[in-house]
Image: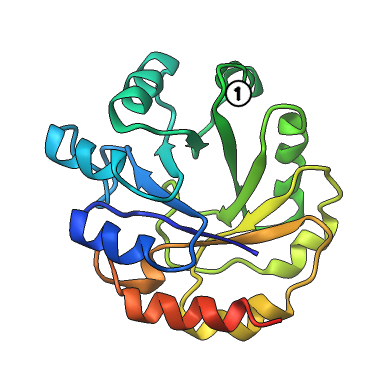
Amino acid sequence: MIVKVCGLRDPDNIRAVERLPVDLCGFIFYPRSPRCVPDDEFHAAAVRSCRRPAVGVFVDASPAEMLRTAERFGLGWLQLHGDESPEACGELRQRGFRIIKAIRVASAGDLAAARAYEDCADYLLFDTRCDGYGGSGRRFDWSVLDAYAGRVPFLLSGGIDAECAEAVRGFVHPRFAGVDLNSGFETVPAVKDAGKLGKFISKIQLS
């Protein structure tokens, strides 16, 4: 199961999280997010030195901005969390980036949006539909994903916390690839509780 920890920023916290059995570390570059990574050399160096693959999270940023940020911060993955077009995703993927496309979900009908990204995303990320772009801290009803019949594997996101280990272990879908962990494991925005994360990961990775 893929484990992505998102919303990192503090260098010491990055070091603590990357020592855990995580697969991807996510860094948010959306100015309206309380977890946004500042565009300075101190934070760029911290992200570049991350020993796990770094995912840059963007919301409706221009391709030029994403490419500039990717080069500065050493990003190999891009997560598009807004209303980016399949064409934009495809162009970035052709440049060699791995692409995660977020789909906001409240009901089975929202899954129709995923079809457009079948040929341009490496993973989908199903997040809770809310007024903003993620960060709601709420889980959507995972049973609506029974209606997802696409080819692209997906990550579960939205409101997953330390109490959700049993639910994650019990969730079954042929395209379920892993989880995206964020606010449910924070002490304050952008600072993760590495101990709590480690315990959770060990529970969901039990064979």
Q: Position of residue 161 (x, y in %)?
A: 46, 76
Tell me the amino acid under the disc marked 1. Arg
Q: Position of residue 27 (x, y in %)?
A: 35, 45
Note whether residue 190 is visible: no
Task: Give the residue drawn at x 71%, y 32%.
Answer: 117
Q: Nearer the viewer, residue 17 or 188?
A: 17
Q: Position of residue 156 (x, y in %)?
A: 61, 60
Task: Give the residue drawn at x 44%, y 28%.
Answer: 60
Circle count: 1
Q: Which residue is mark 1?
A: 93
In the figure, is residue 78 to the left or right of 64?
A: right
Locate the C terminus and report the quarter of the image it occupies: bottom right
Specify how the rendered protein is coloured. Answer: rainbow
Q: Nearer the viewer, residue 16 or 55?
A: 16
Above or below residue 170? Residue 99 is above
The image quadrant of residue 143 is bottom right
